[in-house]
Amino acid sequence: MTAEAFKENILPLNRKLLGFANHFMKDIDEAKDIVQEIYIKLWNMRNELDKYNNVEALAMRMTRNLCLDNIKLKKTVPLKGNIKEEKENTHLEKEQHEELNIVVKRVKKAINLLKEPQKSIIQLRDIEGYDYEEISQILNMNVNTVRVSLSRARKKVREIVTQKYYNHEPGTNKSSVREIL
């Protein structure tokens, strides 16, 4: 791959890679460092990139793996989250905005309680907007496994949010959710 082709095909992935890295690292500076490292790795393997069907999926997988490696090195997982917030609609009342912000924060917390790969799958599908095939390539998983994991992740988020914040019982006992939290 030439330098010009690299600029045209790889550099535009910056926003996606940065958002994905920030999802894991919860620190924009660390996310930028990781994306920079991914670009260096991709540049060093530029002559081999033509062998891959989906270079974007490769870059996303590399980003995910490097983030997880860095988190393991720290031995802690940051709890603050960055989920795309809903755009403010001018017709909504102030109370509705506040309620929406509260719900978004609760969902963020619930997603952060998920274990891998459910956390990554829900991030890629529901927040980043990737389709199942792309997610399966990024995470190196079967498409059906991605679908099942996403369904279970969504169900777990619903259970956590409804039980913890609204004291409802959607089919499981409260003690099991308390153990998760």
Image (cartoon, helix red, strand yellow):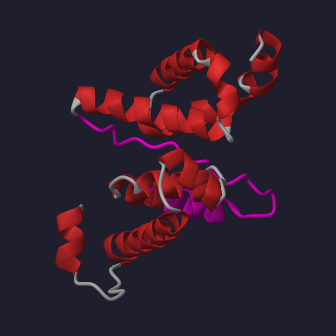
Residue 125 placement: quadrant = bottom right
As drawn, is 66 to the left or to the right of 53? left
Query: Does residue 127 sit above or below 52 in this rendering?
Result: below
Image location of residue 111, percent across then percent down: 42, 57
Residue 94 placement: quadrant = bottom right
- Would you say residue 93 sits in the magenta stretch? yes
Q: What residue is at 40 percent from the left and 54 percent from the top?
A: 117
- Where the C terminus falls, by quadrant? bottom left
As drawn, is 124 to the left or to the right of 111? right
Q: What residue is at 25 percent from the left and 27 percent from the top?
A: 74
**What residue range appears in magenta?**
76-105
Q: Which of 37 and 119 is in front in this view?
A: 37
As drawn, is 7 to the left or to the right of 176? right
Quick check: can you spot residue 22?
no
Residue 118 placement: quadrant = bottom left
Q: Nearer the viewer, residue 49 or 69?
A: 49
Image location of residue 126, percent across then percent down: 59, 59
Query: Does residue 17 sit above or below 4 in this rendering?
Result: below
- Where the N terminus falls, by quadrant? top right
Q: What residue is at 54 percent from the left and 17 percent from the top?
A: 41
Magenta residues, dominant SS class: loop
Query: Does residue 152 sit above or below 124 in this rendering?
Result: below
- Would you say residue 115 sits in the magenta stretch? no
Q: Nearer the viewer, residue 94 or 85?
A: 85
Q: What residue is at 80 percent from the left and 57 percent from the top?
A: 90
